[in-house]
Amino acid sequence: MKIPDLNRRGVMIAAGLTAGAAALATNAAQAAPAHATSAPHGQSYPPGRPGIDYQPVIAPNGVKIPFTVSDGVKIFHLTLGEYDHTFAKGLVARVWGFNQAAASAIMEAVEGDRIRVYVTNGLGGPTAVHWHGFILPSGMDGVGGLTQESIPPGETWVYEFPLVQHGTLMFHAHHDEMVQMGLGLTGMFVIHPRRPRARADRDFALLLHEWKIRPGAGRPDPNEMTDLNVFTLNGKVFPATDPLVVRQGQKVRIRFANLSMQNHHPMHIHGHAWRVTETDGGVIPEAGRWPETTVLVPVGSTRTVEFDADYEGDWGMHCHMLHHLMNQMGHGAQNMVGVDTNALQALTQDVIPDAMIMGQHGMDEHGQHVEMGHMAVPRNAIPMVGAQGPRGYISMGGLVTMVKVRAGITSFGDPGWYVNPPGTEARRATPEELSRDRISSEIDRSVS
């Protein structure tokens, strides 16, 4: 059948447009890979050298996994096993971890490196290790029963693949995930760019995790789905979290990673504002970055922020989910806020003479009473909030640390508590000031 000229011309035009679009798509795909990269693929690169080709991250309380180099390949060893982990003084639990680093193992390499990871299964059941967010061959993805056979107990298996991207990624067990990840088999993997971008003076890596550890229990409950009560930064809770110490004026980068059970963590900093610069998918273009003082870190994701440490002081940094500022909080306690407990205390005195009824003014009473030695906590438990600070009791626990900014320091050990310059610290107002500024009557009315 003869095709009319008009139709033939239309077919030819459509074919030309299709071919042109296909060529453009091919060129675009070659010019702009879908994942973060700073170097051409398909080339061989020497293994990246720490301190020369990249600046290693700082992992407060974390455990850096060492590597060796053989024939141009970076070699890591991971052993999955259980051990007794200290979350803070007074709270120890039997957990699972990579190289005895529960929710606190950190690996580093450079885009273009080829890595070989030996994984030894020291658990009682099978496992596999998934490389979360990596672009890699399917057979190395690490999902037991899907992309590989699961690793039997006592055996050592090997993963090997090139790193074709850069960014803040993660790794974790991917067999019986609720139990194995819930008990601590999670870690961070930082891949530095082959062609370094502007370096940060201080580059921190923080892995978020959450647990259910009942007071007195010696092992977390990995089957808990909602009532989590211990929230960790690199495996520790405040007041055991190491501070992030920086010199005033330095550029700071913080990499947050979240492999917790269920909660998105809004991480908030005091006294500064940062810009969100990366996700686990790669670097955010300059025009797409936004200023924040709180960054939401979803489950299974990473977020990287950067800021200039312009202001001296001890600045709190914590999750802004309110119960994540508590340790071993539970729902069993009655709400006593606003209740006059004196009468109740008198009624129970003969039966339970040592009982202390708290909560009339909030939960900070618990930590303060423990701190002063007036009461004990259950065996293998810690106060729900806080620790003694330089100016009183700090009523926070859980996902909390401090960013300590100091002028002119050359050592980055904990500098102790900051002393506010005279005239720069909040204080009690005097009657003369209240009278002068004519607000005493308004205060009196609001109190009454």
Image: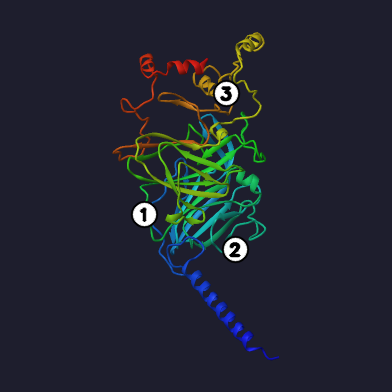
Q: Is residue 63 left or right of residue 201?
A: right
Disc 3 versus disc 2: distance between alpha carbons? 49 Å
Could you say which is closer to the camera, residue 182 or residue 98? 182
Q: Which residue is at 57% across, 52% downward?
A: 120
Disc 3 versus disc 1: distance between alpha carbons? 48 Å
Q: Say which element carries label 3.
A: loop
Residue picked out by circle 3: 377
Residue picked out by circle 1: 198
Q: Coloured how?
A: rainbow
Q: Residues within 10 Å of mark 2 (few under 14, many from 20)?
A: few
Report x, y in % for residue 220: 62, 37
Report x, y in % for residue 233: 50, 40
Q: Earlier in the sequence, mark 3 or mark 2?
A: 2
Q: Is residue 271 above or below residue 149?
A: above
Could you tell me the amino acid type at mark 1?
Ala
Disc 1 versus disc 2: distance between alpha carbons? 33 Å
Residue picked out by circle 2: 138
* Mark 1 or mark 2, whichever is nearer to me: 1
Q: Residues within 10 Å of mark 3 (few under 14, many from 20)?
A: some
Quarter holding the N terminus is bottom right
Q: Is residue 354 above or below residue 102?
A: above
Residue 340: name its quadrant.
top right
Q: Say which element carries label 1.
A: loop
